[in-house]
Image (tube, helix red, strand yellow):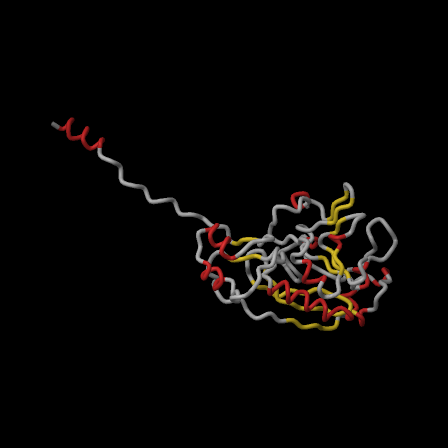
């Protein structure tokens, strides 16, 4: 009798298993042609939720290279703010023997709000020539509005590798030459260097940026044509990603040098 009972139980259909929970990535990097409805459908989300989580206006156009949250934020994104302040001689050039080409009085430290790779809003700064302060502020305001992620900016105590910082002024020459870099004049800005390396033949700067040499697929912090570069090129900067002799995807300068 017991054998027949057990055999009968084995023939009963098993209860349906609950589907495994879907783990979504923290965000989606916008690609050319993406629409909010297509992104929502891809991740099984509601368009209204995506719009609310990212603070999108009803008629807002998605910008390539921007990041969209795929879950509710802990708090609303604060309004963008900026300020500029003078730079001391020590901050501009800790070694007077370098004889940097621009006096500290011509430089300004520009503070901006930016969105980091974890979607956290931070305050960071970079030093530029005073003549490009307004254009720099407008460019970073657009990056923030477009939700473009910046890996880190000074002071960034958690980033001992300073080569990955988005930055401007640096009293140095062009690599391999005695010619002053545009950074030494405060007239160049590098954005997310690791994700947007300078490539000249077999030379790569910064080192260990090999995974980002291919410019597709679109990934966090990468700059593409008609994407994040427009924040700068619509404000008077030229982009090194359009150069022919080499590609410097991180580099923006008002004089195209």
Residue 249 pos. (x, y %):
72, 52
Residue ID at (73%, 70%) = 133
Q: Tell me the quarter of the image containing the C terminus.
A: bottom right
Residue 77 pos. (x, y %):
53, 66
* Picture quadrant where residue 129 is located: bottom right
Residue 230 pos. (x, y %):
68, 60
Q: Tell me the quarter of the image containing the N terminus.
A: top left
* Picture quadrant where residue 171 is located: bottom right
Q: Is residue 230 left or right of residue 119?
A: right
* Picture quadrant where residue 183 is located: bottom right
Residue ID at (87%, 62%) = 99
**Image height of 1 relative to 182, above or below:** above
**Image height of 44 relative to 60, above or below:** above
Residue closest to the eye, 241 or 107: 241
Residue ID at (79%, 68%) = 89
Residue ID at (79%, 49%) = 244
């Amino acid at each position: 009798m017991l054998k027949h009972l057990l055999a009968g139980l084995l023939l009963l259909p098993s209860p349906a298993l609950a589907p495994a929970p879907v783990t979504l990535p923290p965000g989606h990097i916008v690609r050319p042609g993406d629409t909010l409805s297509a992104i929502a459908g891809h991740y099984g989300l509601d368009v209204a939720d995506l719009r609310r989580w990212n603070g999108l206006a009803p008629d807002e156009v998605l910008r390539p290279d921007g990041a969209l949250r795929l879950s509710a934020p802990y708090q609303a994104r604060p309004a963008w703010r900026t300020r500029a302040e003078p730079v001391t001689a020590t901050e501009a050039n800790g070694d007077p023997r370098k004889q940097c080409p621009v006096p500290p009085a011509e430089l300004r430290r520009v503070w901006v709000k930016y969105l980091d790779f974890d979607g956290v809003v931070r305050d960071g700064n970079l030093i530029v020539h005073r003549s490009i302060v307004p254009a720099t502020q407008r460019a970073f305001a657009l990056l923030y509005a477009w939700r473009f992620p910046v890996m880190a900016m000074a002071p960034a105590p958690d980033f001992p590798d300073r080569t990955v910082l988005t930055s401007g002024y640096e009293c140095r020459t062009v690599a391999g030459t005695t010619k002053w870099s545009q950074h030494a004049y405060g007239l160049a800005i590098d954005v997310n260097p690791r994700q947007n390396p300078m490539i000249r033949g077999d030379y790569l700067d910064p080192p260990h940026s090999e995974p980002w040499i291919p410019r597709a697929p679109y990934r966090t912090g990468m700059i593409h044509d008609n994407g994040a570069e427009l924040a700068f090129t619509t404000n008077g900067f030229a982009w090194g990603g359009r150069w022919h002799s080499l590609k410097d995807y991180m580099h923006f300068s008002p004089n195209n040098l």
